[in-house]
Amino acid sequence: MHTVPRARLPLWLAVLTAIAAGPVLDAGFPDKDIWPLTFVGIAMVLLAQHGRRAGSAFLVGWLAGESFYLVHVSWTALYLGPIPWVALSTLEALFWGVGGILITLAYRWVPRAFPTLLGRLGLLPVIVAGLWVLRELVTGTWPYGGFSWGRVAESQSTSPLAPLVAWLGISGVSFVMVWLVQLLLELPGAIDVRTVQRALLAATAVAVVFAIPAWPATTHGTTRIAAVQGNGPAGYFDDAPPGAVFDTQVAETLRIPSAQATGAKKVDMVVWPEGSAMPDPTRDPSNAAILDALSRKFGAPFVVGSITQRDGRFYNSSLQWEAGKGAVDYYDKKHPVPFGEYVPDRAFWRPFAPSLIDLIGRDYTPGTRDNVFDINGVRAGISICFDIVDDQLLTDMMRGGAQVILAQTNNADFGETDENQQQLAIARLRAIEAGRSLVNISTVGSSQIIGPDGRTLSSIPPFKPGHMVADVPLGTTTTPAVLLSRGIELLVAGLGLFGMLTAAIGRRNSRPHMRRPLPPVR
C-alpha cells in the first residue's frame, strides 16, 4: 500500500532549489525567452515544496517567489529605486508562500485519502495544478486589483503551447503546464507501474499537450491601420517641455504617405500610443486644431491617448478623434496601476515612504465606460497599457463585438528593460486568445501589429521613430477561451481547492487498516 513519501529534498537543499528556481523561471520569459526553462522552474518549485511542514513550506514558497520577482520585475527599480521593487516582489512572494503551504498539504493529504494509482497520477497533478492557478488568481485580483504579471503561461507566447490559449485562456494554460510537470514528477515514483508503461504515459501526456491544434481564427475583411511611434520624451522624469511627445507624434505621422499624394489606399484609422496627445485636446484648442487637420488630411479618425479631467477627477483616456467633431468617443483606463498611477489609501501609506508617495502627484480614477469604439463600422477593442493583463477587460471587449484590438501603451519609464518584451508577449497571447489582430503601439517600443494567429504583421524598431501601415484582418471567431471566459480560471482553481479539502476529509475517514504512519517531514 502506498504511503506518503518523505521529503524529496532535505530542507537546506530545498531552500537552495527554491532560490535558484526564480531566475530559471524568469529565463523562460522575454527577453531571454527560453520557454522550456519555465517547466524546469516549475519542477524546481514543486520539488522544494514536497514533504514540508507548514513553516518550511511557506519558507521555500516565499523564497521561490522572492527570487523570481526580484529578477522578473527588476525594471520597476529603474526610476523609482529599490523600495517599490522590493516591496512589490515581497508582496507577491508572500502569496507564493501561502500557496506553497496549500500545495504541501495536497502532497500530504491526497495520497492518504486516495492511496491508489489514480490518486497519485490522476488526482494529485490536477489538485496541485489547480492550487497553483488559485494562487495566480488571488495575486491577479487582490489587493487593489492585483498584479497578474508573471503567470507561468505568459512565458509561452513563442512556444508550441501558445495556440492553447485560444482554447483555455492564460489561466488554463498555466494549469496545463503545472499539471504536466507534476505528472512527470510523480511517474518515477510509481514503481508498481512498469518502466515502459511509465515512459509511454509520459510521452503521451507531452504529445497531447503540445499537439493540440490551433483554433481556426476566422476573419472577414480587413481594415487599413496606421500606427505611429514618435519616440518622444514620454518618461515620467523626462525633462521635456509641454507638448514634446505630441510634436514627435505629429512629425512621424506626417511621414506616412497620404493617399492623395501617392494614390495608395487610404488608411481607415490612425492609432497613437498612451499619453501621446498632451495637453488634452478636449481642453487645448491648439492640439485640437492639429488633430482636426491631421484627421482631415488622412480622411480617417485618430485614436489617441491623453490625460483628461472631468468633474475634478483625472483619467488615463483613449480618444476617438474625428475632424470637425472632436472626441466622438472615449475610454478611460479601468485598471490604473496602484502606486504607479494612483495611491490607494494614501494617508495610510505615505508615512512609510513620503518622498516616493509624493512623486505620484495626481491619482487617476478607474474608468466605467465600455472599452470598444465603433470606427466607421469597425469595432475596435481598446486596451491602455497594463489593461492588457486583466482577463476581464478582454472578455468585456469581446462581448462588445470587438473585431480588432488596439493596445496603446507608454513604456518610456522602463527604458531598455525586459518590461517592453514581457508586455508584448502578453499582447501576443491576447491576440491568439481572442482570435483578433492586435495593434500594440508604444511611445518608444516595442510596437507591433500582430495577427490573430500570433504572427507579427509589421513592427517598428524600439527607441526609434517610425510608423506601421497594414491591412489588418478583422476577426469573427469566438474562441472557447472567450466563450468560457474566467469560468476556466474559476473551474481549475476550484478543482484544486475542492480536491484538497476532499482529501483532508478523506484522510480522516480512511479505514484504520488502510492507515499508515507518516514518515517525518521537514
Image: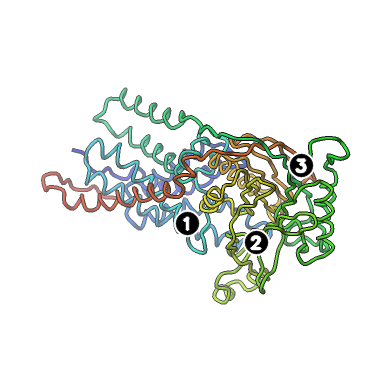
Looking at the picture, which amino acid does disc 3 mark? Val
Q: Residue at x 57, y 47 (%)?
A: 401
Q: Which of marks 1 and 3 is in front?
A: 3
Left or right side of 160 for 359: right
Point out residue 154 in the picture as x, y percentages from the top left corner. Answer: 53, 44
Residue, disc 2? 81
Give the residue pinned by disc 1. Answer: 139
Give the amino acid at mark 2: Gly
Residue 112 locus on image (x, y percent):
22, 46
Which of the two discs, 2 and 1, sits closer to the camera? 1
Q: Is mark 1 on a helix, strand or loop?
A: helix
Residue at 28% across, 48% down: 108
Left or right, 16 with reference to 247:
left
Q: Mark 2 vs mark 3: give the one in front.
A: 3
Q: Which residue is nearer to you in this view: 241 or 3?
A: 241
Question: In the displayed structure, does residue 169 sit left or right of residue 308?
Answer: left
Q: Which of 460 and 484 is in front in this view?
A: 484
The residue labelled by disc 3 is: 267
